[in-house]
Image (tube, coloured by chain):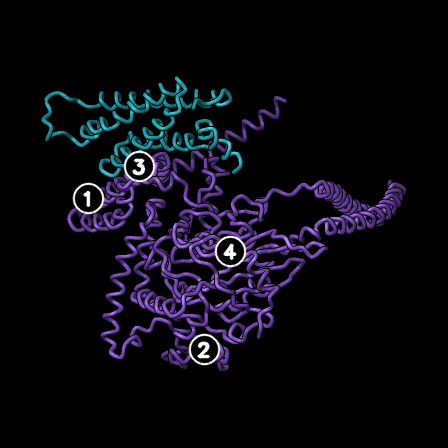
Amino acid sequence: MEPDKASYRTVKVIGALLILEVIGLVFIGAFEFWQVRWGGLAFEDQPHDTVEVAVYALFLPSGVLTLMSAMSFLFMRRKGWHLAAIAQGLSLAVSLWLYSWFQPNYVYPIMAYCVIMILYLNSREVRVAFLPRQDREASYDA
Amino acid sequence: MTPDPETIALLRRFEPVIRSTRGDRFYPMDVEPYVKNCSLWVQRRGQEAVRVVPDGKLSLERLAQQPLDEPGAVHFLKLSDVEEMETDPDAGRLQVFRRHARDRKESREAFKAGRGRLARVGYLSRFVDALYSIALLARGRVPGESAAAATEAYERMMAEHENYRYHGRVLRQNGWIVLQYWLFYPFNNWRSGFFGANDHEADWEKVFVYLSESESGEVRPEWVAYAAHNYTGDNLRRRWDDPEVDKVGEHPVIYVGAGSHASYFAAGEYLTELTIPLPRPLERATRSIRSIWKTRLGQYVRNGDRSGYFSIPFVDYARGDGLTVGEGGDRAWDEPRLLDHPIPDWVSGYRGLWGLYARDPFEGEDAPAGPMYNRDKSVARAWYDPVGWAGLDKVPSPTEELRTILERREDIDSRCSDLRAEIEEKSRELKKLGVGIAAMRDRSHLDAPREEGTARAAGLSAEIDRLRARLATDETVSRSLEEYAGRLRAGERDPARAHIVRAHTPASEDELRVSRVAEFWAAVSVSLMIISFVVIALFEQRHLISMLVFSIAFFAFIEAGFRGRLVNLVVSANIGLAVVAALVLVYEFFWPLVVAAVLVVGIYILWDNLRELRR
């Protein structure tokens, strides 16, 4: 089901926030990448910082999913919410896993952004906009 | 004593039709042959149970002569004494064992459990269910071979004299004529026969029909109430014209739960959940967190979401495809045994249990007391207040209804007159106070009485406001009563199901359409998860946490897929991850976050003050 016109603004806000997240991820990735001198290093000799940058590639799937969900929001599809939620969960899971192993600095802003996005995606205003009609009516009775 | 023919005729006119489930072995019977086949025992506190009367020697007359009992002593009957079945106890056991095996085979052939008992609930419930089953080993329970022994005894009794009998009572209360049908089953084999919650010897079930009587003395059925698991008061009864009440002529049809003998209005499979509440402090904490989550953080909470409760699922199979007793059925009712005019001594005199006292702390495996008493020997409400038991005490009978409405309206109108007079008097007093205060204005030597007068005036004004509000409400109620009386005069009735808060409904087609794979998964998942945890703990100690998280995620994903709750899983997982991430951020950046919070507060105050200046 498509969101009604009243929730159009909410959908646009989420789409914009997701695109902002993708831009942020690309920017952090590029910044970290340029910090490392790649030439002439054997993999087993890589310093710790270089490994941290290499594992940044783990954000690639969640980044792609985030971009897809942002595109989906532009076309006002309900599935976009599911994609966005999965992308945020994936990003957060990767961040926490990297934090437990390397504690790279770049995970903190990603974590903070994902926490805010998860809360926003699960907010009543957003969830109601993307619920099937019968659930939406029921949720007003709560 | 000769039974009163009018009472018998009234009972027989509306006697229920019992539709049992295929595979059920016990049907309503007369208490006399049962008691004759029982022994009477007494269990005194801290002592072994002592047999007071051996089986074969007990009768209803003798049962009524229960001696005075000391505090904590429990008298009980025992039907299935395996060792008493033969002179050689071993031969008796062997006979029962053979019978048990035969019963199981016959039961398997006659009854197929519906799909989805465990598949209908989540992991926690399945886990608690497993714990409940394990706890049965430690709790007092009816021995495994008792069902077979009871079947043997029941068949023997039926071979001697086949009977299908209810125990009837007719009484008048609050303008209603109550027909009580007490159904006695020799054994409840819900657990051992139908995967239910409990087994116990003896089972007393009840069906009440409520009649109204016109001025000409003609009686008409108005309501019917059946005893059912987890339901009380208004939810127990249905109006006679409710389409849910199945009838054969003037006989209400009862669909009896297999083994449990609980009564239902419609055929089907009923999911009964035994709910175990959280400890009170934990429940309060959960409620507070949910409230903050929902109201302060504006987060979405699905309607009907429960938290903090474990529930054990059981299915009551009331399919109605077995033996039917009553009007138009496979068997007819025998003449009822009356429980009144006067109350038989065995009803009022015997306060003990009607079967084995298993000493189960949850009482589920203990036999019930008789129709008149609760297990704790107090008099049962269904006996002394059958109208209140079904929540009918607030409902006048049709002959009284209009009169009751008009009386209520008169009461309210009279109260309105009193209120109007009181308001008028107090308003006059308030006006006098008002002019007094006005006269004292700008008279500094009268400041004290003026302040006192102002306070009194404020109090009086508030009181008049309360009285006016009450008057307005009463006037509205009076008008509603007038309209209600008008509707009744026009022959209009309330909706038949308006009184029902929670109706017991059988499982829907969708719920029953659980795939075999989902059913298999539900049966093995808890054990698989426990085994996988043990394997990880033994062989993957280096990656213990991550492997545990991975395996939990794996099981949760499959489970959510089967139950169609992947969205819920994603939301729950996200919330969990967000909480952990938030804690990590607070841990890593505690002081910067404090500084940032203070800065934000400062900027907000600045912005708020500047905004005021701009106005």
**Separation of disc 3 and disc 2 at Cα?**
59 Å
Can see residue B590? Answer: no
Residue under label 3: B561
Chain appearing in cyan on the rendered image: A
Label 2: which secondary element: loop
Dot 1 alpha-carbon crowd within 10 angstroms: few under 14, some 14 to 19, many 20 or more: few
Dot 4 alpha-carbon crowd within 10 angstroms: few under 14, some 14 to 19, many 20 or more: many
**Separation of disc 3 and disc 1 at Cα?**
27 Å
Give the amino acid at mark 1.
Answer: His
Q: Which residue shows up at 40% across the image and 58% down it?
A: B260
- Label 1–label 2 contact, CB within 8 A: no
Dot 2 alpha-carbon crowd within 10 angstroms: few under 14, some 14 to 19, many 20 or more: many
Chain letter of disc 2? Answer: B
First in sequence: mark 2 vs mark 4: 4
The answer to whether B141 is drawn above or below residue B429 in the figure is below
Of marks 1 and 2, the one in the foreground: 2
> Residue B51: which quarter of the image?
bottom left
Residue under label 1: B543
Label 1: which secondary element: loop
Give the amino acid at mark 4.
Answer: Pro
Residue under label 4: B16
Chain letter of disc 3? Answer: B
Q: Nearer the viewer, residue A88 or B182?
A: B182
- Label 3–label 4 contact, CB within 8 A: no
Of marks 3 and 2, the one in the foreground: 2
Residue under label 2: B59
